Amino acid sequence: MSESRDFDLIVIGAGSGGVRLARMSAQKGARVAIVESRYLGGTCVNVGCVPKKLFVYGAHVREDLEDAAGYGWQVPDDGVRFDWPTLVANKNAEIERLNGIYQQLLEGAGVTIIQGTATLRDAHTVAIGERELSADHITVATGSWPSTPDIPGRELILSSNEMFYLPQLPRKAVVWGGGYIAVEFAGILAGLGVETTLVYRGELFLRGFDDDIRQFMVGELEKKGIRLRFNTTINAVEESGTGYAVSLSDGSVMQTGLVLAATGRRALTDGLGLEALGVEFTTSGHVQVDETFHTAAPSISALGDVIGTPQLTPVALAQGMVLSRRLFGDGEGEMDYRNIPTAVFCQPSIGTVGLTEAEAREAGHKVVIYRSEFRPMKHTLSGRDERSLMKLVVDGDTDRVLGAHMVGPEAGEIIQGLGVALKCGATKADFDSTLGIHPTSAEEFVTMRTPVA
Ligand code: NDP
C-alpha cells in the first residue's frame, strides 16, 4: 500500500455493500474513506427493505383487527382509525436511528465519512467538490435507482422512493410492474385501504419465481381486493381533476389518485466518469467486473446493485466481505450465487430458495415434485379465506432437494432455515427424517410424503 496516497481505499456509496466493505477493510488496518451524497445505509435502509417492511407490518394490522373477531375480541368499526402521517413519521424516526447507527459503525471502525458527490478524476483520484483525494483502490458501490419507462406523463408517475414520503394516501392507486416492488407495494396499499390495480405487461407476474407460486399468488392477491390486469401496459398518464387518467394498452382509461412505477432499477453510475477511465459496462448498463469485482481499470472495483448481480442486500454484504478479503486480507474468497434465499413481502408473503420446477427441468434433472396447499391454522377461527402453498423440487436420481418454495405467513422466516439445508445439500430423505414442530405451517416441509403426479 502506498503511503503517498491519502487512503488505501475510497468507497463511493454508503449502502449495504459499500459500508460493509469499508468497515471490514478498516478493521483489517486499511486507511479507508467512504463518500456518500445522500444517506448512510443506501436504498435498503432509507427507501427499500427496512421502511418497506415497516409499511408491510402497518398494512397487515387491518387484517389482524378483522381476524380478532373469530378469537372473541370485539373491535368496534367506528373505534378504529388509521393515520398515515403517523406511520410515516414513526418510520422516519426509525430510519434516522439507523442512519446514526451506520455512522457509529463506520466511525467506530475508523472509516472517514465524506458527505458529497464523487467524480473519478483518474484511476486513483476521487474529487468531491473542490476536494481531491487519492487512494490505491477505489470501489464503486453506488447502487441502483428506479427506472420508469419513457412515456407521456412520466413526470407524474411516482417511484418507490417517493412512496416512502407520501404526504397522504390516495383513495385509488395504479401500480405498474410485476416484480418484487410492484407486488409488495400493491399489498401495502391494498392493506391500508387503497383501491389498488396492478398493471403488468406479461401473461403472469413474478417472472423468475416458480410457476405454481406465481399462479397461486393471483388468487391470493385477488382475495385481498387487488385488481390484476395482465397483458396490459401503461401508454400515457395525464392529470385529470384532482388525480390522473391512465391510458392502458387495451384502449381503456383508468382514473386514479396515484401511479407507481415499479418497472425495475438501473445501475447508478451518472457523473462518475467511469467511461473515460476504461471501465466497461454490460449491455444492461451495469459496471462489468470479474469474479474478484475488478473492472477493466485495475485499481477500480465495483459491487452491489451497480454490477447487476441479484439486487439484494445480503448479496451486496457478502460481496463486500469477499472484496475486503481480496484487497486487504488473505486474497482469497469468492461469491457463490447458487441457492440465494429470497422473500417477497407481499401478503401472504413468498419465500423461495434454489431451483424452480422449470429451472430444474431445463437443467436436465429428473424432477419429483411435492406440493401441499392448506389453510393456515390461524384462519380456522379467523374465518379468513387465505391459503398457503409449499412446494419442494427434488432430483429423482440423487434425492437432493433442489428448490423449496412457499406462499404463506412468515415465508421469509421459514425459508431462511431451508436455505441452510439446501446449502448443505440436504436430500428429501433428510427432510423426511427431520421432526416437525407442531403445530406450525413450516412442519409441512418435512411431512410431505407423496409426490404429485
Ligand atoms: P423487477 O426486476 O423485480 O421487476 C420489474 C418489473 O417491471 C417486471 O415485472 C418487468 O416485467 C416490469 N417491466 C420492466 N420494464 C418494463 C417496461 N418498460 N414496461 C412495463 N413493464 C416493465 O424490479 P423491481 O423494480 O420490482 O425491483 C428491483 C429489484 O430490487 C428486484 O429485482 C429485487 O432484486 C430487488 N428487491 C428485492 C426485494 C426483496 O428482497 N424483498 C424487494 C424489492 C426489491 P417483465 O417481468 O416482463 O420483465
Image (cartoon, rainbow, N blue to C red):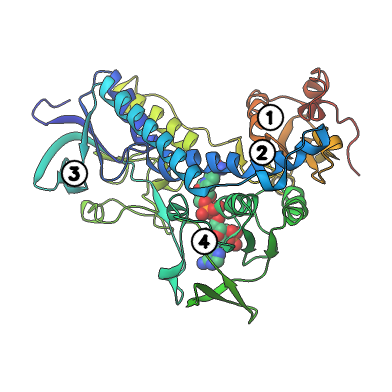
Q: Residues within 10 Å of mark 4 (few under 14, many from 20)?
A: many
Could you give the CA–CA distance between mark 4 and mark 3, rounded to whole angstroms?
Answer: 39 Å
Q: Which residue is mark 1?
A: 414
Which residue type carries mark 4? Leu
Which residue type carries mark 1? Ile
Q: Residue at x 17, y 30 (%)?
A: 7
Which residue type carries mark 3? Ala
Q: Earlier in the sequence, mark 2 or mark 3?
A: 3
Q: Which residue is mark 3?
A: 123
Q: Quadrant of residue 136?
A: top left
Could you give the CA–CA distance between mark 2 and mark 3, rounded to whole angstroms?
Answer: 42 Å
Which residue type carries mark 2? Gly
Q: Name the secondary structure under disc 1.
A: helix
Q: Are marks 2 and 3 in contact (CB under 8 Å)?
A: no
Q: Quadrant of the N terminus?
A: top left
Could you give the CA–CA distance between mark 1 and mark 2, rounded to whole angstroms?
Answer: 8 Å
Q: Residues within 10 Å of mark 3 (few under 14, many from 20)?
A: many
Q: Quadrant of residue 17?
A: top left
Could you give the CA–CA distance between mark 3 and mark 1, rounded to whole angstroms?
Answer: 45 Å
Q: Earlier in the sequence, mark 4 or mark 3?
A: 3
Q: Residues within 10 Å of mark 2 (few under 14, many from 20)?
A: many
Q: Are marks 1 and 2 in contact (CB under 8 Å)?
A: yes
Q: Which residue is mark 4?
A: 260
